[in-house]
Image: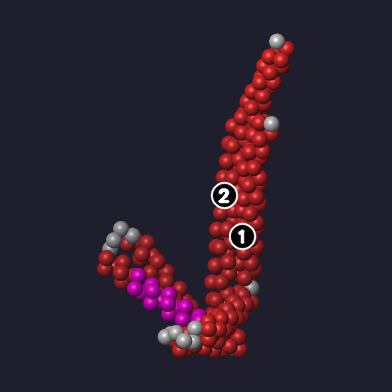
């Protein structure tokens, strides 16, 4: 009886480890799907740009509808009109993006290029003024931002056909790689933990079986006496 209980206690953590290992395996599989989607998006950057714009437009529409419903539900509050204005802006932006995805991609590409350019200039200026411990790294990052902004602006609006899609695909690629790393690393750790837990667990079961056998033999000797 004691041996059965010990065996049950030993199998319960193993069952939990198998469930966790299966979950982390699904996480790694999702990472593989994202990596493949990112690679396909990098090859077909134009399609990825239009896809990302449509996704962005639908997200704005859904967010605007949800915000409008929340504003109607809280119409007696002080921020009712502010919530209505924000929801209306999201709805209008989502409608415009879905109606004119190419023009929206051009505007977003221009905005991204200006962000890279200004961010790189500020980083360069900060690195030259402060000259801290990460002076070289800040200088390289600032120069890279300025160069990327200039390259995008120099070929705009033609660059708008692939810049947004390339950024979107790179985000999918790196997210997928991080999920794969987390899933594979967690499964490896669970495997090591289950191997370590199996040795003392089996030893405890053997000791319990031996103790039960000794107790049975002593009871039998006492009954014979």
Q: Which quadrant is home to the C terminus?
A: top right
Circle 1 crowding by C-alpha within 10 Å: few under 14, some 14–19, many from 20: many
Check whether the beta carbons of the residues at disc 2 and disc 1 lie within 8 A of each other: no
Color encoding of the figure: secondary structure
- What span is colored magenta in the figure? 106-123
In the image, residue 20 sits, relative to residue 97, either above or below, namely above
Residue 21 % position (x, y): 63, 49
Residue 167 % position (x, y): 54, 72
Which residue matches tag 2? 185
In the image, residue 7 sits, relative to residue 102, either above or below, namely above
User: Is residue 167 found inside the magenta-colored segment of the image?
Assistant: no
| Image quarter of residue 118 | bottom left
| Image quarter of residue 1 | top right
Q: Earlier in the sequence, mark 2 or mark 1?
A: 1
Which residue matches tag 1? 31
Q: Residue furthest right?
A: 224
In the image, residue 10 sits, relative to residue 49, either above or below, namely above
The Cα–Cα distance between marks 2 and 1, rounded to whole angstroms, is: 13 Å
């Amino acid at each position: 009886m004691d041996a059965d209980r010990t065996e049950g206690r030993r199998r319960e953590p193993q069952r939990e480890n198998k469930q966790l290992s299966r979950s982390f395996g699904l996480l790694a599989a999702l990472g593989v799907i994202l990596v493949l989607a990112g690679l396909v998006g990098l090859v077909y950057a134009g399609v990825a740009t239009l896809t990302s714009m449509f996704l962005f437009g639908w997200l704005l529409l859904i967010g605007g509808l949800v915000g409008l419903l929340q504003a109607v539900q809280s119409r007696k509050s002080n921020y009712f009109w502010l919530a209505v204005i924000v929801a209306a802006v999201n709805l209008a932006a989502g409608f415009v993006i879905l109606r004119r995805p190419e023009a929206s991609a051009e505007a977003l590409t221009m905005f991204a290029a200006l962000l890279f350019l200004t961010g790189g200039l500020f980083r360069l200026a900060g690195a030259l003024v402060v000259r801290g411990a990460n002076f070289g790294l800040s200088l390289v990052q600032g120069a890279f931002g300025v160069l990327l902004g200039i390259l995008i602006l120099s070929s705009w609006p033609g660059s708008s056909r692939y810049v947004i899609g390339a950024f979107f695909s790179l985000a999918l690629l790196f997210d997928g790689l991080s999920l794969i790393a987390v899933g594979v690393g967690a499964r490896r750790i669970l495997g090591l933990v289950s191997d370590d837990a199996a040795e003392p667990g089996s030893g405890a079961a053997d000791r319990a079986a031996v103790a039960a056998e000794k107790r049975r033999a002593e009871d039998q000797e006492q009954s014979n006496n």
